[in-house]
Image (tube, helix red, strand yellow):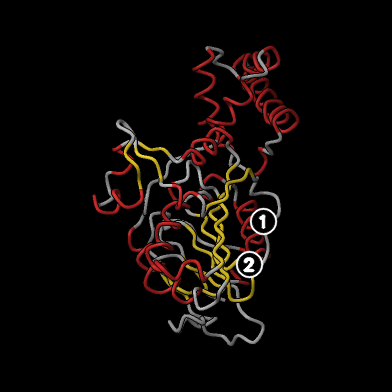
Amino acid sequence: MTSADVGDFLENIAFQKLKKLLHERAGLDCSCYRNDYLKRRFAVRLRATGTNTYSRYVRYLKKNPAEYNLALNDLTINFTAFFRDRDVYLYLEKTLLPRLFKSPEVRMWSAGCATGEEPYSLAILVHKLLGEKLPAHKVKIFASDLDEEALAKAVKGEYNRKQLKDLENPLIDKYFSNNGTSYRVKDFVRRMVRFEKHDLMKPSLHKNLDLILCRNVMIFFSKESQQQIHMHFYNALREGGYLVTGKSEVLSGEPSKRFLCADVNCRVYQKPRADADCKSSSGLGVEKTDQLNLNNPAGGQWIVAQ
């Protein structure tokens, strides 16, 4: 064995030790993430701390406990935007939410909400749709993330002008207060959202949900972890409830057998009712045996609506 081989062997041991430390000290189960993703994110902290190797970084962590939070923050990618993917929000506005609002109580969850743009977009959409009828409905919007720093920003609900660049001025004027250099979500919108810390690898904090949005989050997880999280969502939804995923994300394993495909382009899935037949209740006519070629950025994967 060459010295290079020995070095690689020791670094691999240190990499495993690093994952174990983060689990024991910070509560993050790294086994649910892909190793290539972890290594890309760890590289950021190795450069920032000047340690350059996993062995040195493990020693650095033990001497600098504050680094655990910084590592967690860098492992959680918090890219999001208001009304990201307009066609998805148009589907919510024109099709899905009107269907849900036939009930006087609607419970929704933005899972992996980052700095809050998604749940606030949902709250704005709810207010826009219901208007004066809103008091007659009991609408609950839960929003969760593992990153405490991101959650603190979400609760504050303050954004710069660049973060609102895709919003029309009338919408900004109606739902945001201009504080000079920043824009804050108005209180009547903020009160509609309840933020909380939650690890998606654990069962949902809430049950009998009508709608779950978890978009562009699964790409960081292993396939096995994705399936586990999607089953948590399945169990958290009421019969007939909906799950909306990211455009490049697909269901696999047991979740792909449990959920019905309600809309292919917007990645909307439905938990079937006990008396459901083989077709999606959306009326799109997606049969259990139909295969739909998505031709998506993940490599033209197939969804089987079962």
**Kind of residue sitting beneath label 2:** Leu
| Count of residue discs | 2
39 on left or right of 21: left
Q: Which residue is mark 1?
A: 228
134 on left or right of 180: right
Q: With respect to residue 44, does 226 lie above or below?
A: below
Q: Position of residue 236 (x, y in %)?
A: 66, 63
Foreground: 36 or 261?
261
Q: With respect to residue 89, does 64 lie above or below?
A: above
Image quadrant where residue 239 sits: bottom right
Name the element at disc 1. Answer: helix
Residues at marks 1 and 2, CA–CA distance in whole angstroms? 15 Å
Residue depicted at x 30% and y 32%: 180
**Kind of residue sitting beneath label 1:** Gln
Q: Position of residue 9 (x, y in %)?
A: 66, 23
Residue depicted at x 73% and y 28%: 25
Residue depicted at x 69% and y 54%: 205
The local crowd at label 1, few if under 14, some if 14 to 19, many if 20 or more residues have their Cα within 10 Å, is many
62 on left or right of 169: right
Q: Which residue is mark 2?
A: 237
Q: Position of residue 306 (x, y in %)?
A: 57, 76
Where is the N terminus found, in terms of image quarters? Answer: top right
Foreground: 87 or 209?
209
Residue depicted at x 58% and y 70%: 105
* Dot 1 or dot 2, earlier in sequence: 1
